[in-house]
Image (cartoon, rainbow, N blue to C red):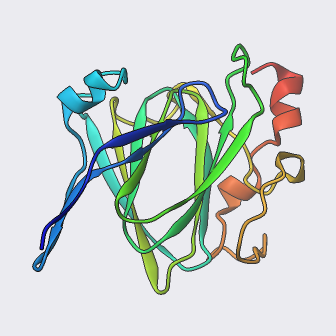
Amino acid sequence: MTEIIDFAVSPTAIDGLVFLTMKQVTDERGTVREFYRESAFEAAGLPSLGPWLQVNVTETHRGGLRGLHGEDMHKLVAVVAGEAFAAYVDLRPSSATCGTVVTTTLRPGSQVLVPRGVGNGFQATGEGSTQYLYCFDHEWMPGMAGVACTPLDPALGITWPLPVDPADPAQVSEKDRDAPTLAQLREVGR
């Protein structure tokens, strides 16, 4: 028996941040997930994202935390194996939703469209490791425009599901741990 789940779009409290359900077809052999179809995005009123200029996959062990990075590029992100608790914060100073935080659980079949300047971060929560896929509309380059915020900023109110030891590099990098807080970013006006 074949089961079909249609492509679906859900807006969030952050302007331009959208949760997506991939079109999925499951039969006795397994599942095919449609990661990106230009015509479906355009029909849903989403921006054209192609061509992708860089695609990365991270493999993160359970409890590992990455982010919050808001480079000057659109990202389409998804978990292709495992599970992640994902957090997003609007770091764009001119945005009406600046400082807003949105969280969700990502599993295979769900994805998030992250606009330029919105911080993207996650904690791997699945057993073993989690593979997190990033598609970028620009290539990452050292010194490129963008901003980062520490995922450990208590003012963001993010409750990571697994305990995080800030001194343990297997859980959070020094770079992410020591990134500025949202208040510090606002203070310097970036």
For residue 162, which quarter of the picture?
bottom right
Residue found at x 68% / y 54%: 176
13 is higher (above) or lower (below) than 19: above
**Residue 19 vs residue 170: left or right?**
left
Residue found at x 19% / y 27%: 39
Image coordinates for residue 153, horizontal then vertical, percent: 83, 51
Quick one: 63 or 189, which is closer to the camera?
Answer: 63
Quick one: 169 or 91, which is closer to the camera?
Answer: 91
5 is higher (above) or lower (below) than 186: below
Residue extending furthest toward the bottom: 128
Image coordinates for residue 107, horizontal then vertical, percent: 44, 65
Quick one: 60 or 162, which is closer to the camera?
Answer: 162
Residue found at x 62% / y 77%: 63
**Residue 139 vs residue 166: left or right?**
left
20 is higher (above) or lower (below) than 147: below
Q: Is residue 51 visible?
A: no
**Residue 179 vs residue 58: left or right?**
right
Of the 4 image quadrants, the one containing the C terminus is: top right
For residue 90, which quarter of the picture?
top right
139 is higher (above) or lower (below) than 3: above
Of the 4 image quadrants, the one containing the N terminus is: bottom left
